[in-house]
Amino acid sequence: MTTAQSRPILPSVILETEHLRLRAFVEEDIDDVHASCVDSELQRWIPIPRPGSPYTREDAEAWCREVAPGMRTGGEGQQWAMVERRTGRLVGAVGLVRTLWAAMTTEVGYWVSPWGRGHGYATEAAVAVSRWAVDQGFQRVEIKAATANTASRRVAERSGFTFEGVERSAMPLHEGRTDLAVYSLLPGDLA
Ligand SMILES: CC(C)(COP(=O)(O)OP(=O)(O)OC[C@H]1O[C@@H](n2cnc3c(N)ncnc32)[C@H](O)[C@@H]1OP(=O)(O)O)[C@@H](O)C(=O)NCCC(=O)NCCS
């Protein structure tokens, strides 16, 4: 898990859950990533590529080819494509982000494609990735969601995370800023 330099990197793994296969992004995911990320509900809560800028096909190409793989090799965490096992179709993304190696903390982030929502997939993926993070030795796994993002907050709660409080004005959206509800999972919570 440690490189010759200083920043550790996570091992590249495929995770299987009841309905999902979590694997690295590939070239063939570009069209579905683009179709997912231009969705208005996703854009409401995740201001990609950056606040105020529209999401383009070039952004989806960069995500699949460079950004997502680079998050693992750069030591920030790891990104997985959520693929529905039954159909083989991409239905979302889940990742470990903002990893602080000195503190052994990391954060789970996710989105689900419009055609994959309402089946429990975000919860299934968040459970798998957060438990895997604990298995890697992380001492604290966080989920942060805009306070008004009810669906995402339910994902955190259903995944066994504990609500801790609110970070005020913590994140820019395309329109304005939002407070973030902070949730955490500690290894002892799984005992
Ligand atoms: C949030 C999101 C990932 C949820 O994905 P999902 O796979 O549909 O979630 P799940 O099926 O696991 O549902 C989790 C819970 O949220 C609830 N939920 C789902 N959509 C909801 C909505 N629009 N409003 C309120 N609750 C909702 C579900 O009913 C479920 O709760 P329950 O068990 O009490 O019934 C998805 O809606 C999404 O991608 N939204 C846009 C991007 C985003 O907000 N990402 C998170 C940023 S922090």
Image (cartoon, grey):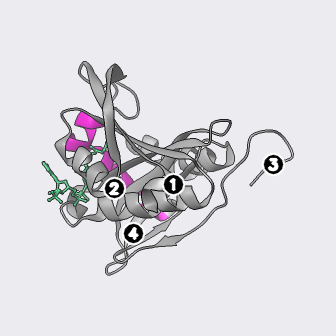
- Start-end of magenta stretch: 28-45
Which secondary structure lies at badge 2? loop
Q: Earlier in the sequence, mark 4 or mark 3?
A: 3
Q: Which residue is mark 4?
A: 83
Q: Residue at x 67, y 42 (%)?
A: 74
Q: Which residue is mark 2?
A: 160
Is 94 situated above or below 28? above
Q: Earlier in the sequence, mark 4 or mark 2?
A: 4
Which secondary structure lies at badge 3? loop
State the image coordinates of residue 147 (x, y, percent, origin top left): 23, 32
Question: Which quadrant is home to the N terminus?
Answer: bottom right
State the image coordinates of residue 143 (x, y, percent, origin top left): 38, 43
Q: Which residue is mark 3?
A: 3
Is the CB of mark 2 within 8 Å of ligand 1?
no
Which secondary structure lies at badge 4? strand
Q: Earlier in the sequence, mark 3 or mark 2?
A: 3
Three-letter amino acid code at the position of disc 2:
Gly
The overriding secondary structure of the stretch rendered in magenta is helix
Image quarter of residue 145: top left
Distance of label 3 from label 2 (alpha carbons): 32 Å
Is 122 situated above or below 47? below
Please check the rendered image and state whether residue 39 is part of the magenta-colored stretch, yes or no.
yes
Distance of label 1 from label 4 (alpha carbons): 27 Å
Left or right of 128 on screen, residue 73: right
Question: Considering depth in this image, is 28 or 138 the residue closer to the camera?
Answer: 138
Q: Residue at x 28, y 43 (%)?
A: 38
Is the CB of mark 4 within 8 Å of ligand 1?
no
Residue 165, visible in the rendered structure: yes
State the image coordinates of residue 108 (x, y, percent, origin top left): 44, 47
For the residues labelled 1 and 3, say whether their Cβ atoms are less than 8 Å apart: no
Distance of label 2 from label 1 (alpha carbons): 11 Å
**Badge 2: residue crowd in 10 Å (few <14, some 14–19, many ≥20):** some
